[in-house]
Image: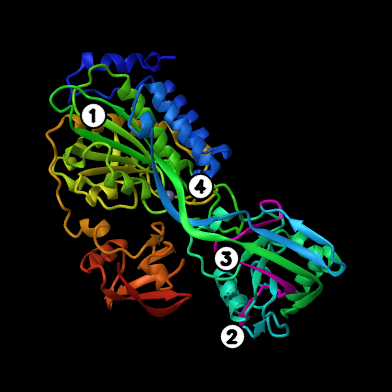
Amino acid sequence: MRIWRWFPIVLVVPLLTAAEKAAPAPARITDAEARMRRDITFLASDQCEGRGPGTRGIDKAADYIADQFKKAGLKPAGADGSYFQPFTINANVLDEPARLALTGTQGQTIALKQGVQFWPMALGGSGSDKAPVVFAGYGISSNKAKYDDYADVDVANKVVVLLRGAPRGGQSDRNRELMKGAPFVEKIANAEKHEAAAILFVNDADTARDGDGLLDFNYTAFTRSVGSIPVFHVRRSVLETMLPGGADTLTMLEKDINREMKPHSRELPDWTVNVSVRMHHGKIDAKNIVGVVEGAGPLADETVVVGAHYDHLGFGGNGSLSVSRKMAIHHGADDNASGTTTMMELARRFAAMKDRQGRRLVFIAFSGEELGLFGSEHYCKHPLYPLEETASMFNLDMVGRLRTDKASGKAKLLSEGCGTAKPFRALLDKLGDKYDFKMVNKPSGFGPSDHASFCGKEVPVLFLWTDYHDDYHRPSDTSDKINVAGMRRIADLSQEAITTLARMDKPEYVKVKGDSPLKYEGPTLGLLIDYGYQGEGVMLKGVREGRPAAEAGLQADDCIISINNKPINSVQTYMTVMAGHRKSDTIEVGIIRDGKKKTVKVKLE
Ligand SMILES: [Zn+2]
């Protein structure tokens, strides 16, 4: 089917209007919204598995986007005549399926199946061992709470089986103290301190209430491994097999621990466990999707990039703000199926125009954004069209929750980057008026999305979005909550913005005062910053494998409050202060961890 059949109105627009003064030229509203609803519903569906790099779901999403580009008539700009620009992301990778087997006293062996009864966890290390088993409760030792699951058992060179979570039957102060020992990383460190040979984690009764789900390897593949011993997540049935009395005994043990607030650790003398995990710090494959609409006339050799990231958090993992401790599809409808959908709609509209005057439009769906802007950084290092001749970059990330601004009664649209080129502010003012948005404009071009990579290369950028919400980075960011009509309105404004960007005199890049173009060229710590954090300082949602912050022991939930005694109250000041440092400097990073101030030395690279 030829795509232009869908766009009767768009096709006549260039004939009716002068380029810059063009009236809004949306396709028939119902058609555009129907297409956008279809796209976002697919991208945010269970089929796409939350579009986490390394999942099969993200490949389905990539094929879908490439297919839409093809149907719209975009020229493929990727490798080997395809729409794909491949790259890799550092991650922990399994060399082979891990092995886990239980052997009973009579020599009977139960070989368990990876993905069915267990998954190895990337938080642990490689190794193989055959060892006796000890059930060590929640695996928590806390002086303050006067509680130690390891007090009465010797786990040296043995496999420990641990419940997730923490005992909850005490007073709130005591429970809070015990919760500090609940994160996987704390339990792994504690087990290693007690010289355990390996760890098998099981869901506690609460986590398993509606289904005893496993966290698969990819859930932790992008986090720094903290342990050196093999670590597994196993089904409760595995522990039940080894406990005399089975499921009833496990239920009783948990109840007793919680009621008495006393450990009930015990050896499981009838069993030995064989474990084997082989993994390494490797790479996983990812890809950007790139489709081109050529322009015509004297500016046709120059480029405007229109981008939106299509990856999201998959089943959760490090970037998740989900309160449950389960694997769940993080649908990422707003973040960023909405931007991807809007970008595809724009691609269709521009591809359907005949002899469009102006610059080439390069439409890119980026991957690896949530893990650290990897896709856009890769494009900027290996641009398919020269960056010197890339006049501007237009980015859409989270445009699906258009809401009314109470004061003005208008729909509120946020922009960033208007300070990166002189004409941008006036352009946004004009478009905001014309399309009836309350615009909130931020000059900086270094916000937390892919345009920052281009800004770092001194390409002027514009970024549109519709603000954070309670479903941000949670499984509940679903397509039924998307304001599709609002998204279509943003597409209409974007169409005119991009038309202008494609035809205006090449804008000169302006460095915004206080903004740091060094961010991606100067030293970086390898932080995963929680941009949704509202308080003082820079909150970490994680650190990147093998980078300085990870080496120095920084971790998720640390809040950076100073660097070399200079107070850091926001991401902006963090970037400004970091820009003043050089690679190979050692800096003192002040953090708050678990409510306590701490200083960590970090060697930059
Ligand atoms: Zn996000």
Q: Residue at x 51, y 69 (%)?
A: 226
Compare residues 90 and 414 and report the one nearer the observer: 90
Decide: few, some or many residues near mark 3? Use Cα within 10 Å; few <14, some 14-19, many ≥20. many
Q: Which residues are magenta?
A: 115-142
Marks 4, 3: nearer the viewer: 3
Q: Of the residues under marks 1 and 2, which one precedes in the sequence?
A: 2
Marks 1, 2: nearer the viewer: 1
Q: Of the residues under marks 4 and 2, which one precedes in the sequence?
A: 4
Compare residues 115 and 467 and report the one nearer the observer: 115
Q: Of the residues under marks 1 and 3, which one precedes in the sequence?
A: 3
Q: Secondary structure at mark 2?
A: loop
As drawn, is 450 to the left or to the right of 329?
Answer: left
Tell me residue 301's x, y (percent): 18, 29
Q: Is residue 120 magenta?
A: yes
Tell me residue 180's x, y (percent): 56, 74
Judging by the rendered image, the residue that carries numbered circle 1 is 360
**Mark 3: which amino acid?**
Ser
Between the residue at mark 1 and the residue at mark 3, the CA separation in whole angstroms equals: 49 Å
Between the residue at mark 1 and the residue at mark 4, the CA separation in whole angstroms equals: 32 Å
Answer above or below: position of 102 versus 364: below
The tag on residue 54 is 4
**Mark 4: which amino acid?**
Gly
Between the residue at mark 3 and the residue at mark 2, the CA separation in whole angstroms equals: 33 Å
The quadrant in which residue 524 appears is bottom left
Judging by the rendered image, the residue that carries numbered circle 3 is 126
Marks 1, 3: nearer the viewer: 3
Tell me residue 74's x, y (percent): 34, 25
The tag on residue 3 is none
Q: Of the residues under marks 3 and 2, which one precedes in the sequence?
A: 3
